[in-house]
Image: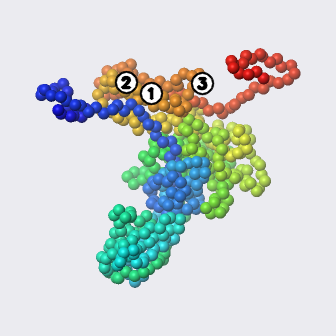
Amino acid sequence: MPIIQAGAINNTALIVPDLYVEIVPPQNLILNGVPTNILGVVGTSTWGPVGTPVIAGSMSDYYMNFGPVMARKFDAGTQVATAVQQGAQSFRCVRVSDGTDTFASANIPGTGLGITALYTGSLGNQITVTLQPGSSASSWMLTARLPGIQPEVFDNISGVAGAFWLSLASAVNAGAGVQRSASRLITIRPNGNTSTPTNFSLTLGSATVGSDGAAGVAPGQLVGQDGTSRTGMYALRGQGCGLVLLADADDPQTWTDQAEFSLDEGVYLILTGPKGDSISNAITVKQSIGLDCYGTKLMFGDWLWWADQANGLIRLVSPQGFVAGRLANLSPEQSSLNKQLYGVIGSQSSGQPQSGETLSYSSADLASLFSAGIDVVSNPQPAGSFWGVRGGKNSSSVVTRNGDNYTRLTNYIAETLSAGMGQYVGQVITATLFQNVRATILSFLQNMFGQRLLGSTDGTLPYSVICDSSNNPLSMTGLGYVQANVQIQYQSINEKFIISLEGGQTVQVAVQTLPAGQPSQ
């Protein structure tokens, strides 16, 4: 009784009489939506790999991988911290440097053996390393410590002279089997050392001081280089980010590069103008640069006052982290308009809280910004006196696609189809293939409809999918083409809410019939 996999043999050409059990895999007619809450952040830090995206889900994760929040421009930690305050919980962080970053290191007294921080950066100067007798007889234990991180302990390292130092280096650099993984703090170079081990305690930075390579960073480094060795923004290719920001990259010359990346990767890229900008200059610069893209959101250069708890300072920071974090915590059909931002205590235009100023944008100011495709964080909002994004607009001049919801929902749908529909490439073109393609897309859209990501005001289905012989004639299928025509009507955002109030002693009120079961007043 042969047991075969579906498609493994030609079932119409069997000769031997027998029972054939064919294993048919279950049909996969379901698409699972891609995440929309992953936020990519590019900036400087005091620790961590350069040019490599690293996952972080909280500020403690960020500290372990990149070090503390720094009170300086282009700091990635600042943007992560402000985004976390809005509820963001999934980050892909990329560190950049100006090329002058160095490793903290130290030499063990009386030996030629060197200990070096795993990454460049000033945080490595705080690493302490101690060697003392181990738990077992005739063994040694090395401990590496960094404030705020669980100490790393490599115990029961044995051996004599050079063999010991090789064993120690192997445990630290490659891990000690199932006992513990390789160090995330230090590396050791044995350098042929044959001395007898003795107790020591040292702090890295005594031989070479670790430095961040942040002083010479400019927005160009944050954009980075594309190619086989990607840096900066381009290191986020293929990372599944729904949103991306380059920390404090306020140089307009980088905006079109960022816009191109946003369309290539299907991400919503949050831009910022330079702090202290004027409305007229912002509009002129945007027009001269030629930025007109639904994949980017340009925030006006009215930077925000923020209480930096890590450094005990009130700092002026770009609005990018606040806005990106709030969007990351919203469903993709939603707009940032009229949604409260947390942690903002003032802005350049309104001043710090203690200044006593209560300046706000006029309707004319807002109309000028929004018409030019520039958004702004302000207080008050239509719903009350709180800080929030005032327009919910992207950088496009096309009114049918200049909202946050258009960008995020379009990217979500396109990325989901891209991730899941490739299963049908290579299959034989039949009526069954058409049915399966249509059923898969419809099931995804129906799930969106059920979760209210899609909807309509009159109760009709806001989508349709055509994939059959009507749009796939033989002249196309004979050449290997299959086309699915998908139409989706998005829900609109209530931006201009009009209430017509007619009151007075002479008003004639039309008699209204109450719905059945509703009590009269």
Q: Mark 3: which amino acid?
A: Thr
Q: Which residue is mark 1?
A: 442
Q: Mark 2: which amino acid?
A: Gln
Residue at 13% x, 26% y is 17
> Of helix, strand and loop, which one carries label 3?
loop
Image x and y of residue 215, in percent: 55, 64
Q: Which residue is mark 3?
A: 457
Is residue 331 something that shows in the picture? yes
Q: Residues within 10 Å of mark 1 (few under 14, many from 20)?
A: many
Q: Which residue is mark 2?
A: 435
Left or right of 26: which side holds 444?
right
Residue at 48% x, 28% y is 446
Q: How far is the residue under mark 1 from the one under mark 3? A: 20 Å
Q: Residues within 10 Å of mark 2 (few under 14, many from 20)?
A: few
Ranked by sequence position, the earlier of labels 3 and 2 is: 2
Measured along the vertical axis of the image, is residue 48 above or below residue 334? Answer: below
Image x and y of residue 200, in percent: 44, 80
Residue at 45% x, 56% y is 51
Ranked by sequence position, the earlier of labels 1 and 3 is: 1
